[in-house]
Image (spheres, rainbow, N blue to C red):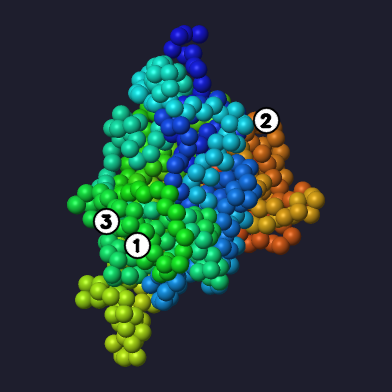
């Protein structure tokens, strides 16, 4: 073996956030050697991301830690409406149905996925990912700064400095992945093309402790929008009060003018601002931390060069509006993880890795646009409140909205219209679950897909290649409910057919492929007793659907060929077309 082809590990990951640690967890689960590096002593030091949507939860379900997440997260039913109020104790102006908890959308969310949304702050999520990844064999290196890398046709050498001992060293791996955040050194080294702008707006955050239970226990809500024209809340005209640990730990946030530089505040100013949010002086407050962050609108159009890949916030940078950040990071990692595993194990041609950019870059572009549009959409509410029309006090605001006049009636109608627009931020199940992949890892069908409802708001379930397998409850041999998501994935391809598709089963068994499972829905092990799969499968009982390890559909046929030999040939041709060995 040449010196060049000797490796210290299979994959090196720079960054231990939601993207990096999900990738570490996936690779370790699939039996791939992986080492992760961070220059920091530990994980995220602030709450940061918190909304975990259904698709991210499905990923965590597949990786076997969904129940652990649910045990330490704020549950779905406590996430509640998003309130618009003059203060926590003050006049309530409106409520926005949020996160699929409202009566008119909850059923859509339950039908669309076996996994709920939850609210879990980034430090807790990262710790859980690290714990499970390390238990499965991933090696974590803290206090270790990534310096640079070189690559050749067979591998990558990465250079590091131990920040404790000051020792510099190098490691050689088959692949390197940069998931090192919005200031990514790896992205900079690769000179990946970035479109958009950085730091177009700024927000100040104050993390504080205060028992506010009496103000919220009757109307649980993790997000409270505070409308107070006397407070100077910045570009969107509202401040945000966010529950970190219901209902005793919070974030108060408001905008600032980036052209004037990052603001500083005295303790007295912060206390006054927090009390403005709460609307009461009779609360004991303990300020823990003050920080600023910036609103970015940037995405990479290419995610890799050679054997080096990037993902997460390194390639899509945007505000937290719509709660898409860590969710997209987790999904980037899930998409890349199984592809790296298959190439490392020799189960797939290395060209499979080219599909990572092709599939994920359009998603990154979409969510950057969506998150920023959700922030722009607050202009509708700002206009309703009249901040640009001379409204400077709470009394004027309330009079404008609640006056018994025809003019105020029109303003109230505008308010309700503005709330409808915010469904694209708070009830956009389609944005989260309607992702479609077009790549060589999918044998796409030519027919154009038609969405009968708005594809950002509503999930369209389909088995067409490039879409995620629909969720349907079936019954296993023990009489327990299992989702179709539970019997596919897990790092393997799955050929799904019915009782009349016995020939598919036999053809797959003869191939003796280590990565391919076959499931006949209708046998005693998996019965479609509700008929849900029959309604959602879009194939006949003798047809077949090939589901990728990430739950996306690679290929389908609505019926089987006439002869068993044709079935075997068809399956072999499909696998060859997908670059599988």
At 71% from the left edge and 38% from the top edge, which residue is drawn? 506
At 60% from the left edge and 50% from the top edge, which residue is drawn? 72
Q: Is residue 219 left or right of residue 524?
A: left
Work out which residue is located at the far top of the displayed protein and give it.
Answer: 2
253, 525: nearer the viewer: 253
Frontmost of labels 2 and 1 is 1
Q: CA distance from mark 2 to mark 3?
A: 61 Å
Residue 418 appears at what percent x and percent y?
36, 73
* Residues tagged 2 and 1 counted as in contact (Cβ below 8 A): no
Q: Quadrant of the C terminus?
A: top right
Work out which residue is located at the far bottom of the displayed protein and give it.
Answer: 405
Q: The residue tagged with tag 2: helix, strand or loop?
A: loop
Q: Earlier in the sequence, mark 1 or mark 3?
A: 3
Q: CA distance from mark 2 to mark 1?
A: 69 Å
Q: Residues within 10 Å of mark 3 (few under 14, many from 20)?
A: many
205, 516: nearer the viewer: 205
Q: Earlier in the sequence, mark 2 or mark 3?
A: 3
Q: Quadrant of residue 127?
A: top right
Q: Quadrant of residue 237?
A: bottom left
Look at the image and tell me whether residue 558 can be seen: no
Residue 188 appears at what percent x and percent y?
30, 32
Frontmost of labels 1 and 3 is 1
Residue 555 appears at what percent x and percent y?
54, 45
Q: Residues within 10 Å of mark 1 (few under 14, many from 20)?
A: some
Mark linked to residue 272: 1
Q: Which residue lies under the disc numbered 2? A: 512
At 33% from the left edge and 65% from the top edge, which residue is drawn? 238
Residue 360 appears at what percent x and percent y?
42, 43
Q: Residues within 10 Å of mark 2 (few under 14, many from 20)?
A: few
When the figure is inspected, residue 415 is found, relative to residue 51, above or below; the finding is: below
At 46% from the left edge and 48% from the top edge, which residue is drawn? 47
Q: Which residue lies under the disc numbered 3? A: 256
């Amino acid at each position: 073996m040449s010196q060049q082809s000797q490796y210290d590990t299979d994959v090196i990951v720079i960054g231990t956030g939601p993207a990096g640690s999900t990738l570490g967890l996936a690779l370790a689960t699939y039996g791939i050697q992986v080492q992760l590096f961070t220059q920091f002593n530990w994980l995220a030091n602030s709450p940061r991301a918190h909304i975990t949507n259904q698709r991210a939860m499905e990923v965590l379900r597949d990786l076997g830690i969904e129940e652990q997440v649910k045990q330490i997260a704020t549950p779905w039913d406590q996430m509640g409406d998003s309130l618009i109020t003059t203060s926590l104790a003050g006049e309530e102006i409106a409520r926005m149905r949020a996160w699929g908890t409202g009566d008119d959308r909850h059923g859509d969310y339950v039908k669309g996925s076996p996994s709920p949304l939850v609210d879990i702050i980034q430090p807790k999520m990262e710790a859980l990912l690290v714990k499970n990844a390390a238990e499965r064999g991933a090696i974590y290196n803290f206090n270790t700064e990534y310096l640079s890398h070189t690559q050749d046709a067979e591998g990558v050498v990465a250079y590091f400095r131990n920040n404790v001992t000051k020792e510099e060293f190098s490691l050689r791996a088959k692949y390197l992945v940069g998931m090192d955040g919005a200031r990514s050194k790896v992205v900079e080294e690769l000179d990946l093309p970035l479109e958009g702008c950085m730091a177009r707006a700024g927000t100040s955050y104050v993390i504080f402790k205060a028992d506010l239970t009496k103000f919220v226990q009757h109307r649980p809500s993790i997000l409270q929008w505070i409308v107070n024209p006397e407070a100077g809340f910045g570009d969107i005209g509202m401040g945000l009060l966010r529950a970190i640990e219901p209902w005793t730990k919070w974030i108060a946030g408001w905008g600032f003018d980036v052209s004037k530089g990052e603001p500083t505040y005295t303790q007295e100013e912060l206390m006054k601002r927090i009390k403005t949010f709460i609307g009461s002086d009779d609360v004991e407050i303990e300020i823990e931390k003050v920080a600023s962050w910036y609103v970015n609108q940037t995405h990479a159009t290419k995610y890799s060069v050679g054997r080096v890949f990037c993902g997460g916030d390194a390639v899509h940078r945007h505000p937290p509006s719509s709660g898409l950040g860590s969710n997209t990071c987790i999904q980037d990692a899930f998409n890349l993880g199984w592809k790296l595993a298959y190439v490392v194990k020799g189960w797939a041609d290395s060209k499979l890795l080219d599909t990572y950019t092709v599939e994920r870059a359009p998603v990154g572009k979409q969510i950057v646009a969506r998150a920023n549009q959700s922030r722009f959409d607050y202009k509708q509410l700002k206009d309703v409140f009249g901040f640009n029309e001379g409204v400077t006090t709470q009394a004027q605001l309330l009079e404008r909205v609640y006056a018994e006049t025809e003019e105020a009636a029109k303003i109230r109608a505008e308010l309700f219209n503005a709330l409808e627009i915010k469904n694209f931020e708070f009830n956009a199940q389609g944005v989260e679950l309607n992702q479609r992949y077009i790549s060589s890892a999918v044998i796409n069908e030519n027919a154009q897909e038609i969405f009968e409802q708005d594809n950002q708001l509503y999930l369209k379930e389909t088995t067409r290649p490039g879409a995620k397998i629909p969720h349907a409850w079936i019954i296993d041999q023990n009489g327990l409910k299992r989702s179709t998501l539970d019997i596919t994935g897990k790092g393997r391809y799955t050929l799904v057919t019915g009782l009349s598709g016995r020939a598919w089963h036999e053809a797959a068994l003869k191939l003796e492929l280590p990565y391919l499972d076959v499931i006949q829905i209708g046998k005693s092990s998996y019965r479609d007793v509700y008929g849900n799969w029959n309604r959602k499968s879009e194939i006949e009982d003798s047809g077949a659907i090939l589901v990728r390890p990430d739950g996306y559909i690679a290929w389908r046929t609505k019926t089987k060929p006439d002869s068993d030999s044709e079935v075997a040939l068809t399956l072999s041709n499909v696998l060859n077309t997908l670059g599988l060995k």
